[in-house]
Amino acid sequence: MLKRHFDNYLTKLIDWWFRIATIERYLIGTGIGLLVAIFGGVPLLLELLRFVLGAVPEGIVRFEAELETIDVLIFGVALLLVVVGIAFAMARFIGEARAQSKLRNIVIEARGLRDDNGNPLADMVAKHRKGSVVPILLDLRNRLDGQVIAPERALNEIASMHRSVLQNKEDGDRADLTTIYGGLTSVPYTFLTGALLDDEGSISTYDWDRAQETWRKIEGPDDGAQFHVDGIEAIGGVPEVVLAAAFSYPIQDDDLATTFDLPIVKLALEGMSSDAHWSQQKQNRLAQEFLEVVKCLAGKGVMRLHLVLAAPNSVVFTFGRRYDKRNLPEIVVYQYQRGEPIAYPWGVSMPVAGLTDAKVVRSAEPVARVSMTQ
């Protein structure tokens, strides 16, 4: 145990030594070098001469006597350099500690598709970011059966999360706050979370890496893949359109037919993959491509979009954040249920285009032939 503590202390000491500023390291290093020279260098050399020659020449003896008279001065200078270097380092350390004490990381973790707790995102953030961590857990699971909770209740939980974020941001200087999001929740919930957090400044996004079984930050390079758009030319004079965006998995026509009787516009990503989303630059660019399609549809008179989105959680979150709340059509984002008679049984109408609250939309039969209710 003592060896483990010693190794841990030595590791931290080495890390501290290489983190301190050059001037501080230079002062401490120079002072220690002088002390080594006084108490180790010259005396050791003289003793070596005595051992080899048997006697030290008279000139060297006189030099040794003169050197002893200035040892005190050199010792004082060396000690002063070390003390000043340590003082500078400690002042910097205290300053950094005070600055870090003001820094806060608001970590939003949304759970809804995995019934186990896994590795908390807050723990991952605490290891890699400075400052304190304020975890906000958005748990949308039903503890009784491991399924997602009723949609209406989930909307209340998401709204509560948003209020909690706003409250934490009011408690300190926004310049000292960083917001981090990561989650595994249903597409409508994730899109809504992004839409609500749209105005909360810069947000660092994480996603769950299924291969590594850990949280991973979205920060890789952009591979340049684009959406292929199909069906937009045929749209004209209709108030509602289905927009099917396939990022990670293809969207089947048969599934769409179980729920919708509306014109369909399709977006399919080149090189479609469930592991092609680890670039925030790419996500932002594709979100802009998505918005350009929506703008085009709005220009054709479309007033309401029914969005079917097959994409990783972080992509859905980014698309939700980028959707313009004021200038784009109403949008309902749907939940997919594989193998069900109605493949998209419900969706969430987002608080955009003048709508103040999110609402649940249920599909009893193809949308064009039903009156949608909350």
Image (cartoon, rainbow, N blue to C red):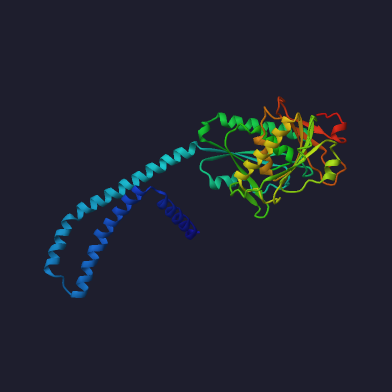
Q: Is residue 125 left or right of residue 154?
A: left
Going 51% across and 43% down the picture, which residue do you hit? 130
When asked about the image quadrant of residue 205, the answer is top right
Quadrant, the C terminus: top right
Res. 166 in view: yes
Which residue is painted at 27% across and 56% down in the image? 35
Front-lying residue, 231 or 11: 231
Which sits in the foreground, 309 or 101?
Answer: 309
Indicate the quadrant where residue 193 lies.
top right
User: Furthest residue to the front?
Assistant: 233
Seen in the picture, residue 300 relative to 62 is either above or below; the reply is: above
Q: Position of residue 19 (x, y in %)?
A: 42, 49
The residue closer to the viewer here, 199 or 119, is: 199
Residue drawn at (20%, 56%) of the image: 71
Give the image location of residue 52, x and y in percent: 21, 75
> Can the viewer see residue 149 in this picture?
no
| Coordinates of residue 14 in the picture (x, y in percent) | 42, 55
Side of 237 relative to 278 (left or right): right
Q: Provide residue 337's location: percent of width, then percent of height.
A: 81, 43
Q: In the picture shown, does residue 217 fall above or below 203?
A: below
Number of marks drawn: 0
Describe residue 111's horizontal placement relative to residue 32 as left or right.
right
